[in-house]
Amino acid sequence: MTINFKSPEIKELQPRLLVVGVGGAGGNAVNNMIRANLKGANFVVANTDAQALKNSESLNKIQLGLSSTKGLGAGASPDVGKNAALESESEIRSYLEGSNMVFITSGMGGGTGTGASPIVAKIARELGILTVGVVTKPFLFEGAKRMRVAEGGLAGVGQWIQCDVSDDASVEAAFAKISQLDILINSAAISAVGNVEANPSDEWNKVMNINVVGIVRTARYSLPLLRKSKCASIVNVCSVAATAGIPKRALYSSTKGAVLSLTMAMANDYVAEGIRVNCVNPGTADTPWVQRLLAQAADPEAERKALEARQPLGRLVSADEVARALCYLASPLQGSTTATSLAVDGGMQGLRIPR
């Protein structure tokens, strides 16, 4: 008797990521990614300029608005770029279908990128795809007019809604304008300086209301939308102040300790519904707020050097480093990461460096 052994076929399941380069700048970005041998994503470029498409290194190309532009470009007109994308909507849709996540990259301020990118984003959202826009704005020397054009294009890529997280009615009204939501990042907060004797009770109430109850409000009104998402994620911005005793920060540290505990409780409450909840714990970050504090010192440069010297890495955390940590936790690629507190503090909490 002969027994044949055969190993089972193993299929590796991976999300389908698509990078869409729109216009000249978007096409250049895709070319750079291809030359860098970036793995794990598919690429497509879309342009009204036939010559630019011909020179693209991407195998997938969409000639936008062939009938309206004749392949001659948008002439720096966002309206021409928009109409060209609408003319090619079915082809754009066919490339987007089946993707789990779409990155749209373009330059704002010209014609094709500014006009067509919002259309690509709109189609992706209609297909229920998690969509991320990575765009550039003009340099200041390019002039105010081009900047206004760019900002108009950005308004089409994303929906910008202002609300006051300290007010229930304001938060409720803001979320009433949103029809689809995959990710909620809670970053609104204010600081306070002093020990327990320094801050009056009304300041404690104010800071707690914004830093802690503000998260409760946004989470409460976002949950009905997040329950409809296939990749729902909440990321709270906490602080190293939640886990390390920082002098003269009693009130602020208390709020961030509450945010850390709230994150873990929410993660437990909603894990069964597929909603992930995590937080990022930044150290002292080089933000405009910190820069304003340093500017108030008698010797701002000396004060900054002293602040940097207290950091284990010898420098402040950058805002970009915190942003990348937020994106990491929010990404559907981290579908098994929940109830996690990610420190971005240069070792401030975990290390004890001899001085």
Image (cartoon, rainbow, N blue to C red):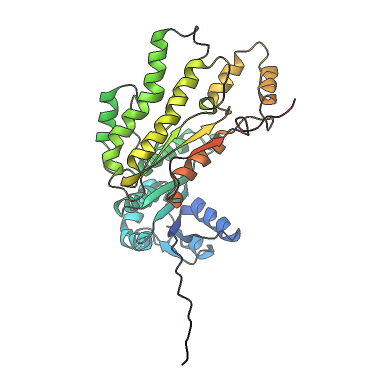
Q: Is residue 72 above or below residue 224?
A: below
The residue lying furthest to the front in this view is: 1
The residue lying furthest to the right in this view is: 355
Q: Position of residue 264 (x, y in %)?
A: 41, 35
**Number of marks in the rendered image:** 0
What residue appears at the point 44 percent right and 47 percent down from the top-left corner?
A: 331
Q: Is residue 318 above or below residue 13?
A: above
Q: Nearer the viewer, residue 99 or 30?
A: 99
Q: Answer whether residue 168 is visible to the viewer in this image.
A: yes
Q: Nearer the viewer, residue 121 or 208?
A: 208
Q: Quadrant of residue 179?
A: top left
- Left or right position of 10 against 158: right
The residue lying furthest to the bottom in this view is: 1
What residue appears at the point 48 percent right and 62 percent down from the top-left corner?
A: 53
Q: Quadrant of the C terminus?
A: top right
Q: Nearer the viewer, residue 315 or 269?
A: 269
What residue appears at the point 41 percent right and 62 percent down from the top-left corner?
A: 63
Q: Position of residue 294 (x, y in %)?
A: 61, 18
Q: Position of residue 350 (x, y in %)?
A: 61, 33
Q: Answer whether residue 75 is visible to the viewer in this image.
A: no
Q: Position of residue 324 (x, y in %)?
A: 52, 41
Q: Is residue 139 above or below residue 93?
A: above
- Left or right position of 217 against 22: left
